[in-house]
Image (cartoon, rainbow, N blue to C red):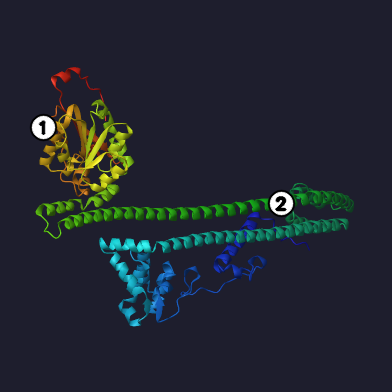
Amino acid sequence: MINTNNPEIDVEDIMRRIREEVARRKTQMNISSQPADMTAQANPMSTDETFVPEPVSLSRMAEGGEALPHKKVYTLSDFLNFHDEAFVRNAYYGILRREPDSGGFTHYLTALREGRFTKIEILGHIRFSPEGKTQMVQVKGLRLSLAIRTICRLPVLGYLIALGNFLLRLPLVVRNWERFEAYTLYGQQEQRRQINVLASQVETAFHRVQQRISERDALSTRRIADAMIELSQLIACKASQDDLQRLLQEFAVLQQSAALRGEVGPQLESMVKALEVKAEKEQLTRLSDQLVSLVENKAEALRGEVGPQLESMVKALEVKAEKEQLTRLSDQLVSLVENKAEALRGEAKVVASKLQEISQQMLDHKRSILDQQRRLTLLLEEARKRLPEPISGEEIGNMLTEEDHLLDAFYVSFEDRFRGTCEDIKKRVEVYLPLISEANAGTKKTSILDIGCGRGEWLELLKENKLVARGVDTNRIMVSHCKELGLDVEEADAITYLRSLKKNSLGAVTGIHIIEHIPFKRLVALFDETLRVLKPGGVAIFETPNPENLVVGACNFYCDPTHLSPWMPEMIRFVSESRGFSRVEIKRLHPNSDGLQLIGGEENVKTIINKMLFGPQDFAVIAYKGMSMDETAFQQPPKERSL
């Protein structure tokens, strides 16, 4: 009998089997994770049996490291060669002779990853805990290293010791970085090798599926041919109507080809109906001859059509499966490379940030140390001059004035952190250039004086615009920094320096965020001396935080510990006018640009809240010195300007 259980070629079933095979191979490769020298012993491409490696115990650690053997005496390197989870597990395993409990393991691992504890400190906590003391395990070098780590956490002195320790360990840090780079390169190569192995496995599996499809197609073709031969034999023997009906039912199952379904099937059905109506032998013979002729003709057509169709179908399946597999492998490879590249970029950013932070800390410490050395040298020279005679009260007073400069280095670091970059400050003070130009200041005869010049951003901007300017500041480190930039700056008190100048000798006096640092009496003296040294028509510009912005007045203003009191804009206007300035303007600057302003709600309420919370963060008082009657006659009216 003819076998009617031959299924059609199901592409989805083939692809499902391919996916299962790929997943099985991938799982096998991930489970094995064996070194390169072991892959030669068992090639998963040559057999269908899954290779199961030896299970990894709890004591087997990361990076292929085994658990530390039990010893009474260890060295620090025995533990420090491990990292992350492996380090914590080996610390418990080596010192306490047991596996870590979940609470302790989580606590130390989290502290290590967040940088709250170093490896030395974790070893110290475990070794000198009550349980660790009972085990009496010795770790050579642990006490000294732990003592150094403890001292390094002390304020000021600890920072200096930590800096010295870092400089001593700098070669080791460089060597560890080179090891990390080599390890990362090895990881990339290993992943690339695994991808190649996976691609080879998928290719082999696909070839197997292709071979099975070809075998099934050949089997289907043979079965159709056998059915045709049996059908012709039955017709030639003038089979009964029941035999033809049975054969037609069996042959209908084999109608997998479009040609058979469209041509052979209907003609056979019509013949069976004719046999049912007319049972005479002559008609049966004639129908048999026609059917034999039809079968012979269609058998030849079937060999010419079914074969190429099956072949084209197989090729289409091969191409489709190959494209899908290549696309999937390409996507996986691209995703893997992108993830690795993103991880490397993240690690590079973290390392760069850490190096920049360390560089800034080293610069701050260098400034502080150099300033302390300079003051100590000065004190020693003053003391050496008077030996063996006693030091006079005046000389002691001169030495005590050095106390005013104890925080110079601190304030420079403070401004670097909170003031903003020099480029940001220069962009913010560009608004005052039109005022300087309008007052005809910045020439040799109408030079500009910037009091409290700080890092010299405003002086740099004036110099770039070819304006003559000089500055004064009491911070020696800032004065030294400005001189290194080629700026004309002196170390002096602002009011004392103004009193040393001649009357009507300057074209402009500026102070960017300086008046909030001085008490009221000295503020009045500053305005008096500024008015005295300005030429008629000269301008004074003083910028200060704006307390009308509640966030500034109640919070941000007090971030600087040297700020004394915020000044209200109208109060500063009144002081300027009362001390003799002829024309005074208040310009509110730098509104909050964080996009936090209210949008909806009642218009009046929205306006008030936005002004009080997100309004201008600074204001500038712009005061002009009046001109004499003769000078007024030749003075052109001021141009319209906007800030």
Mark sitting earlier along the chain (2/1): 2
Report, in whole angstroms, how far the alpha carbon at label 2 lies from the one at label 1. Answer: 98 Å
- Quadrant where the image shows the N terminus: bottom right
Instruction: Examine the rendering and report whether any part of residue 454 can be seen.
Output: yes
**Residue 518 x %, y %:** 15, 43
Q: What is the crowding at mark 2: few (fewer than 14 residues within 10 Å), some, or many (at least 20)?
A: few
Residue under the image location 31 percent in, 40 percent down:
486
What type is the residue that disc 1 sits on?
Arg
Using the rendered view, name the quadrant where residue 213 is placed. Answer: bottom right
Residue 602 in view: no
Instruction: Return the residue nearer the eye: 111 or 144.
Output: 144
Residue depth check, mark 2 versus mark 1: number of the one nearer the observer = 1
Could you say where residue 248 lies in the image, as x and y percent from the top left? Answer: 77, 55
**The residue positioned farthest toward the top in the image shown:** 633
List the residue tagged with mark 2.
Answer: 315
Taking 158 as reference, is 573 above or below it? above
Residue 231 pos. (x, y %): 82, 57
Q: Position of residue 212 (x, y in %)?
A: 71, 60
Work out whether residue 89 or residue 479 is closer to the camera in this orientation and state it: 479
Tell me the SS state at disc 2: helix
Q: Quadrant of the C terminus?
A: top left
**Which residue occupies the foreground of this view, 216 or 433?**
433
Relative to 231, 497 lies left or right = left
Give me the residue at 23% from left, 55% from top: 377
Q: Which mark is residue 579?
A: 1
Labels 2 & 1 near each other (Cβ < 8 A)? no
Three-letter amino acid code of the residue under disc 2: Lys
